[in-house]
Amino acid sequence: IAPRHAANLLHAFARVSAPEPPKFLDALAERVVMGVSELNVIGVVHGAFAAGQAAGQAAKQRKSAQNLLEALTRRFVVLLRHEQSLSQSVSPHHVAIMGRAFLQAGLRSQRVVDCLAEVLI
């Protein structure tokens, strides 16, 4: 499964709060993390939404979700900073999803807050 398809599957399950098979998050998160550089903004946001939902629902999934979200956040920052034309396609909705996922996963970073705020200004 390609990273973007893995992120899409995670998002679909999270969006409807579908029960996940054992190790579902771990296996798909690993695929996303290994191929994170292939993701566009939508793939990153889909994965972040799923990671935030997973981290908020089950303590046993929290670490996998945090690792996934950290990789996705790094990719989001790269996309924002290095591809000027892409930053125009990032909406406040995307920023809100990233910020909420970060909080749901229990992660804190002033650098991430500053980067997300730059998109909105």
Image (cartoon, rainbow, N blue to C red):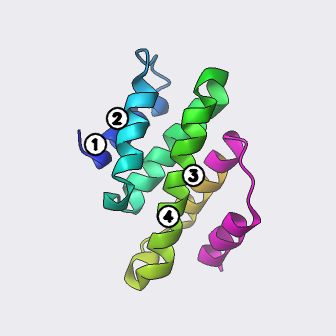
Neighbor class of circle 2 (other Cα within 10 Å; few <14, some 14-19, many 20+) is: some
CB atoms at circles 1 and 2 under 8 Å apart?
A: yes
Residue range of the region highlighted in magenta in the rendering:
101-121
Q: Check the image and report above or below for 110 versus 57.
A: below
Neighbor class of circle 3 (other Cα within 10 Å; few <14, some 14-19, many 20+) is: some
Residue sitting at 50 percent across and 38 percent down? 50
Which quadrant of the rendered structure holds the N terminus?
A: top left
Give the image location of residue 95, x and y in percent: 58, 62
C-alpha span from label 1 to label 3? 19 Å
Residue sitting at 63 percent across and 74 percent down? 120
Q: Any mark on residue 76, and which?
A: 4
Report whether residue 13 is seen. Answer: no
C-alpha span from label 2 to label 3? 19 Å
Residue sitting at 66 percent across and 40 percent down? 105
Q: Which residue is mark 2?
A: 9
Q: Which residue is mark 3?
A: 70
Which amino acid type corresponds to the residue marked 2 in the rendered image? Leu
In front of the other: label 4 or label 2?
4
Residue sitting at 44 percent across and 80 percent down? 82
Which amino acid type corresponds to the residue marked 1 in the rendered image? His
Q: Which circle's residue, 1 or 3, is located before the other in the chain?
A: 1
Q: Which circle's residue, 4 or 2, is located before the other in the chain?
A: 2
Q: Which residue is mark 1?
A: 5
Q: Quadrant of residue 8?
A: top left
